[in-house]
Image (spheres, rainbow, N blue to C red):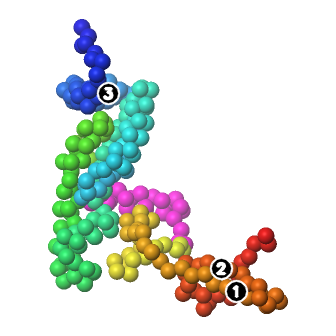
Amino acid sequence: MFKEVSSKVDFVKLEKEILSFWQKSRIFKKSLELRKDAPRWVFYEGPPTANGLPHVGHVLTRVFKDLFPRYRTMKGYYVLRKGGWDTHGLPVELEVEKELGFSGKPAIEEYGVAEFNQRCRESVFRYVNEWYQTSERIGFWIDMDDPYVTLSNEYIESVWWILKRIWEMGLLYEDYKVVPYCPRCGTPLSSHELAQGYATAEDPSVYVKFPLRDEPGTYFLVWTTTPWTLPGNVALAVHPD
């Protein structure tokens, strides 16, 4: 009745056996079928971009994305787990620019905006199979057979409908905010996009002596990594101690 348990457990083999059992027995789908009349708990995955390969960071986040829906399923809820693909964003365009050897917007306009957009649409699904395989291998339960895709007209229409409703509820307002801006791309950047260009570099720094007017021969020693700002300095902020 029970399989013999070896003292030398092959965890990889054990995982694959469990995954195979889940797949052949349709365990994920059965967990939904058994609770179709139960209270709903809906999970929409913050979608990955499939123009890049999954990595260990995605495994970590998907552990949490899997943990909470499983808990709700165990509590008796019908848990809709909707997968999706993020097909918008500057990283997608930059990736295609690299492939085409472009260095800026003029090259895109010369190539043709419509043609460039089509290349972007094609690139965003480049590694879909790898994402499917990784999701299955780590045991991540998600409905990827009917995903939402951010470039589809249905999704875009839904976003505009939501914005319209927010506007009608008086929750939208005009304001000002300092944001990173890319002069090359001609667009504001998110903190994530800005961090993608981060690189460790050696920068000049200097020590400067500022003499005290009332105590000749006494100085404040200041260290700065922005020596080019020194001509504009008008005061020192000094702690009393």
Alpha carbons under labels 3 and 1: distance apart: 72 Å
Alpha carbons under labels 2 and 1: distance apart: 8 Å
| Whether residue 148 can be seen here | no
For image coordinates 52% across by 74% down, the residue present is 178
Q: Residues within 10 Å of mark 1 (few under 14, many from 20)?
A: few
| Whether residue 204 can be seen here | yes
Q: Quadrant of residue 82?
A: top left
- Amino acid type shown at disc 2: Val
Badge 2 marks a residue whose secondary structure is: strand
Q: Is residue 10 left or right of residue 60?
A: left
Q: Which mark is residue 53?
A: none
What residue is disc 3 on?
31
Mark 2 touches mark 1? (CB < 8 Å):
yes
* Residue that sits furthest to the top in the current view: 1
Q: Position of residue 203 (x, y in %)?
A: 47, 77
Q: Quadrant of residue 230?
A: bottom right
What residue is disc 1 on?
210
Specify whether residue 187 is painted magenta. no
Q: Position of residue 234 (x, y in %)?
A: 68, 88
The magenta segment is 150-175
Q: Is residue 142 left or right of residue 128?
A: right
